[in-house]
Image (cartoon, rainbow, N blue to C red):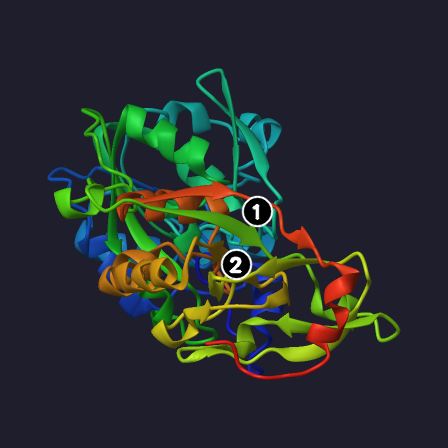
């Protein structure tokens, strides 16, 4: 998806991602190339070359280097061969092992490339994963992550890869195996956490990474840091409850309950709306700190449910505590470490946080968090849910 031609009409984010048609602006291509620290560059490769913007930037920096480009799009390859006849090009579905084997001479580049440039396809919806084999080892993760890991096989020792990837690649459970593999064979750094804003056609949550092959260096997980002595001496406990009620599944013929979606979360408390849900719908009982699971997270979205019971939408997470005072202390710790908390939300389109990332983050703040299931809303409390009002 390196630099597909921009449409005159700006399509929706989901459509662009589905088509993998988000191109790389020249300014971003030049910035990506400038991040390479390799002293001697004789061979440069891009395995999702598109129209060749990244490789053009590389050739401007290293005019005498050999350029190797592959892409799944035959039309793009014909254009590259016509406009850049000195380049070595090949039509290849890079994630398909059989397709790679059919490319004559591709194996000769393994272990011999000085620099790899990538803006791989991002489309990998939800829990969808790509399975690949690297050095006889089966790994599974996102499409972008698979491109990065497979591309490292072509780097020489000391060679570097720079790539634009979904922000979630750095933190998601989906790509844990890929990150672990990269840590075993080299050093992975995040260069820029907000390069998605450079795309003109759409704003993406994308990051710029650099990988150097050889001499692995232990890099701590961005949300795994050593808690301070003061936090260790004032350890908190909470139970994590993920909401399950989908908005489109609200039942107009059900029982009226107070319902909390992310839009109902306020700094001063929760202003739940009354919705009809199935009698068996599970709920959460205060005191609890509610926060968005997905979407824009701001300090104003950390809301304390001091009392009462609400049904949570599937876009909300509750941290149930022993008292309102504990909720307030927990909120204060998150606000005091806002950069760390905000970075735990990742994703190409809408940002989201996973339960495991939230647990890891809370652990660094001296909070012992365990997963808990929401309670089933008791029928005896039905009348209490009939009225609105604010829980603060």
Q: Single out the residue that lies furthest toward the left.
A: 39
> For this view, does 47 lie left or right of residue 112?
right
Q: Quadrant of residue 61?
A: bottom left
Instruction: Find residue 41 and name its label.
Output: none
The local crowd at label 2, few if under 14, some if 14 to 19, many if 20 or more residues have their Cα within 10 Å, is many
Q: Quadrant of residue 105?
A: top left
SS at badge 2: strand
Decide which of tag 2 and tag 1 comes sooner along the chain.
Answer: 1
Query: In this figure, which residue is indicated by the disc labeled 1?
Result: 72
Q: Residue at x 46, y 39 (%)?
A: 175
Quadrant of the rendering where the C terminus is positioned: bottom left
Residue 140: x percent and y percent?
A: 53, 32
Comparing labels 2 and 1, the label whose residue is closer to the camera: 2
The local crowd at label 1, few if under 14, some if 14 to 19, many if 20 or more residues have their Cα within 10 Å, is some
Residue 153 appears in the rendering: no
Residue 174 appears in the rendering: yes
Q: Residue at x 61, y 65 (%)?
A: 309
Residue 88: x percent and y percent?
A: 40, 41
SS at badge 1: loop
Q: Single out the residue that lies furthest toward the front.
A: 380
Residue 55: x percent and y percent?
A: 33, 53
Q: Is residue 1 above or below residue 271?
A: above
Query: In this figure, which residue is indicated by the disc labeled 2?
Result: 317
Return the residue nearer the eye: 173 or 210.
173
Q: Is residue 106 above or below residue 80?
A: above
Residue 254: x percent and y percent?
A: 85, 70
């Amino acid at each position: 998806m390196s630099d597909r031609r921009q449409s005159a009409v700006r399509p929706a984010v989901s459509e662009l991602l589905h088509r993998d048609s988000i191109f790389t602006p020249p300014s971003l291509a030049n910035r990506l190339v400038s991040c390479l620290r390799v002293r001697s560059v004789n061979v440069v490769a891009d395995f999702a070359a598109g129209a060749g913007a990244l490789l053009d930037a590389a050739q401007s920096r290293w005019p005498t280097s050999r350029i190797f480009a592959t892409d799944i799009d035959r039309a793009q390859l014909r254009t590259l061969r016509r406009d850049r006849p000195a380049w070595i090009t090949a039509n290849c579905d890079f994630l398909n092992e059989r397709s790679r084997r059919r490319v004559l001479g591709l194996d000769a580049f393994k272990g011999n490339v000085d620099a790899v440039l990538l803006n791989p396809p991002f489309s990998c919806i939800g829990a969808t994963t790509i399975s690949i084999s690297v050095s006889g080892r089966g790994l599974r993760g996102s499409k972008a992550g698979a491109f990065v890991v497979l591309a490292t096989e072509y780097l020489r020792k000391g060679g570097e890869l720079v790539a634009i990837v979904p922000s979630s690649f750095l933190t998601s459970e989906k790509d844990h195996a890929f990150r672990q593999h990269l840590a075993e064979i080299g050093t992975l750094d995040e260069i820029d956490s907000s390069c998605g804003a450079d795309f003109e056609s759409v704003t993406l949550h994308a990051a710029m990474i650099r990988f150097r092959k050889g001499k692995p260096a232990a890099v701590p997980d961005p949300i795994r840091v050593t808690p301070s002595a003061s936090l260790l001496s004032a350890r908190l406990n909470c139970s994590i409850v993920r909401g399950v009620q989908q908005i489109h599944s609200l039942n107009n013929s059900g029982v009226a309950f107070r319902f909390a979606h992310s839009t109902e979360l306020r700094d001063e408390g929760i202003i739940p709306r009354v919705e009809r849900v199935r009698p068996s719908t599970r709920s959460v009982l205060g005191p609890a700190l509610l926060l968005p699971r997905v979407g824009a997270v701001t300090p104003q979205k950390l809301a304390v449910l001091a009392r009462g019971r609400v049904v949570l939408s599937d876009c909300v997470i509750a941290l149930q505590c022993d008292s309102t005072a504990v909720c307030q202390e927990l909120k204060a710790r998150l606000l005091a470490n806002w950069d760390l908390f905000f970075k735990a939300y990742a994703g190409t389109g809408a940002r989201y946080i996973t339960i495991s990332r939230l647990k890891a983050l809370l652990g660094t703040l001296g909070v012992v968090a365990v997963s808990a299931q929401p309670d089933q809303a008791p029928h005896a409390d039905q009348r209490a849910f009939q009225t609105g009002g604010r829980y603060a």
